[in-house]
Image (tube, grey):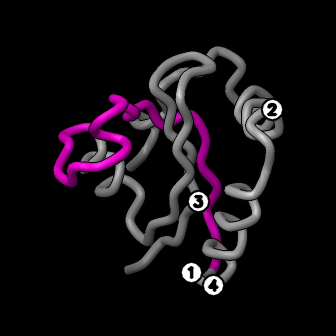
Amino acid sequence: MKEPAVYILASGRRGTLYTGVTSNLPNRVWEHKHKVRLGFTAKYRIDRLVWFEMHETMETAIRREKQIKDWRRLWKVELVEASNPDWRDLSDTLA
């Protein structure tokens, strides 16, 4: 079963950010943490899940991801800090 989600990963508190979309958040976070795909997140050690938002459909998730990717960095930081002021790794809260 697909569970569309938009997520933000960070390299650390207020570190480098990555915004993504997936239909399986636990699996995708695992891939980032184990550097399954070489690329931006592996290169800059971005593997801390600091924010996520679940969606009903992939279409709405993709729209939201594109919206957030267009935001200024400050707005993304404020989005994270509104629900996760300590920049905890939320991956352990995933089922």
Residue placed most toward the observer, 76 or 70: 70
Decide which of tag 2 and tag 4 comes sooner along the chain: 4
Q: Which residue is the site of mark 3? A: 6
Decide which of tag 2 and tag 3 comes sooner along the chain: 3
Q: Are marks 4 and 3 in contact (CB under 8 Å)?
A: no
Give residue 58's mark: 1
Q: Which residue is the site of mark 2? A: 74
- The image shows residue 86 at horizontal and vertical percentages of 64, 15
Q: Which residue is the site of mark 4? A: 59
Give the amino acid type for the residue marked by disc 1 in the picture: Met
Q: Are marks 2 and 1 in contact (CB under 8 Å)?
A: no
Give the amino acid type for the residue marked by disc 4 in the picture: Glu
Position of 68 with respect to 24 (left or right) is right
Position of 51 with respect to 4 (left or right) is right
Secondary element type, mark 4: helix
Splitting the image into 4 quarters, where does residue 83 fall? Answer: top right
Above or below 29: residue 15: above
Secondary element type, mark 3: strand
- What separation in Å lies between label 3 and label 1 (alpha carbons)? 9 Å
Tell us which disc is closer to us: 2 or 3: 2
Q: Residues within 10 Å of mark 1 (few under 14, many from 20)?
A: some
Q: Are marks 4 and 1 in contact (CB under 8 Å)?
A: yes
Q: Which residues are magenta?
A: 33-56
- The image shows residue 52 at horizontal and vertical percentages of 60, 49
